[in-house]
Image (cartoon, rainbow, N blue to C red):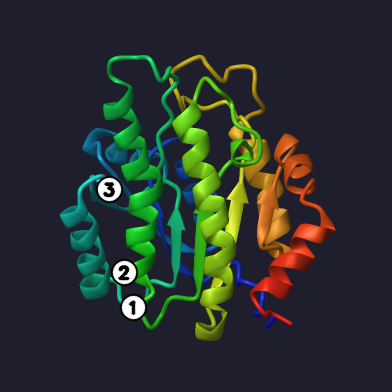
Amino acid sequence: MLQLAIMKMSGNKILVTGGASGIGLALAGKFIEEGNEVIICGRRETALQEASVKFPSLITRVCDLTDFSERESIFQWIADKHPDLNVLVNNAGIQNWMSVSDNYFFKKASTEININIEAPLHLVSLFIQLKSLTTIMNVTSGLAFVPLIKAPVYCATKAFLHSFTISLREWVRSKDIEVIEIIPPALNTDLGGKGIHDFAPPVSDFIESIFVQLKEGKEELTFGHSEGLNNTVPDLWKQTFIKMNQLN
């Protein structure tokens, strides 16, 4: 397999989806600290404004990624106003704790599939049209490997995105685009609801760890429990993947 150059740590122009809170905002702040120009998008203008107060150099854009036309609109805005953008971070995601017997199950499941699967796939298909694009980063989850039955659809969407990311990495190597997977474990954020993840490590520890891995040139960035889960992939799987896809 062709090995790409390691992603440069500064001088990038980066779009982080879902960047107004949680992991997205922490990523944006760290990228700024490392000397990058960062654009974030999100549905809530008030949250974007609060993020701008915390990081004044942020460029913000209101965008509802569940809407097909708004995904196309933000791409066109980037192409027109920021044609030198070279890093796309697919971070936006939602998590619902629910049962398949709930009356609202299918409606909430559809929304999760839209934002967690359709949005990153659509954005990838759009942004690879940018000649400046060098890096795609997809945020998946340790739950891609072992599902939590309280969040059945979320886990399935992250398993989908994990699998897609592996394939995408090989498809775009010939375009000199690097694909990096960020695989967080449970972290102390409001994902899934306030208070659910209060037991978990702080986002700041996770961010510091994955930036060390970025500087080492790793394509799969893990932390704590997600490192162990990712490393359980047997060598036979990896060898079969290479052979089946003729990647020697």
Q: Amino acid at mark 3?
A: Leu
Q: Which residue is mark 3?
A: 65
Q: Nearer the viewer, residue 142 or 45?
A: 142
Q: Which residue is mark 2?
A: 126
Instruction: Tell me the quarter of the image containing the N terminus.
Output: bottom right
Q: Amino acid at mark 2?
A: Leu
The quarter of the picture where residue 25 lies is: top left
Instruction: Tell me the quarter of the image containing the C terminus.
Output: bottom right
- Residue 123 left/right relative to 230: left
Residue 220's label in the rendered image is none
Whole-percent x, y for residue 224 in the image: 75, 37
Q: First in sequence, mark 1 or 3: give its number.
A: 3
Instruction: Estimate how packed mark 3 is, as few (under 14), some (14 to 19) or many (20 or more) residues with alpha carbons within 10 Å.
Output: many
Q: Residues under labels 1 and 3: Cα distance?
A: 19 Å
Q: Nearer the viewer, residue 224 or 108?
A: 108
Q: Which residue is mark 1?
A: 129
Q: Residues under labels 1 and 2: Cα distance?
A: 6 Å
Note whether 209 is above or below 111 in the view shown: below
Q: Residues under labels 3 and 2: Cα distance?
A: 13 Å
Instruction: Estimate how packed mark 2 is, as few (under 14), some (14 to 19) or many (20 or more) residues with alpha carbons within 10 Å.
Output: some
Whole-percent x, y for residue 149 in the image: 55, 23
Q: Amino acid at mark 1?
A: Gln
Of helix, strand and loop, which one carries label 1?
loop
Residue sitting at 43 percent across and 17 percent down?
Answer: 99
Of helix, strand and loop, which one carries label 2?
helix
- Residue 89 left/right relative to 5: left
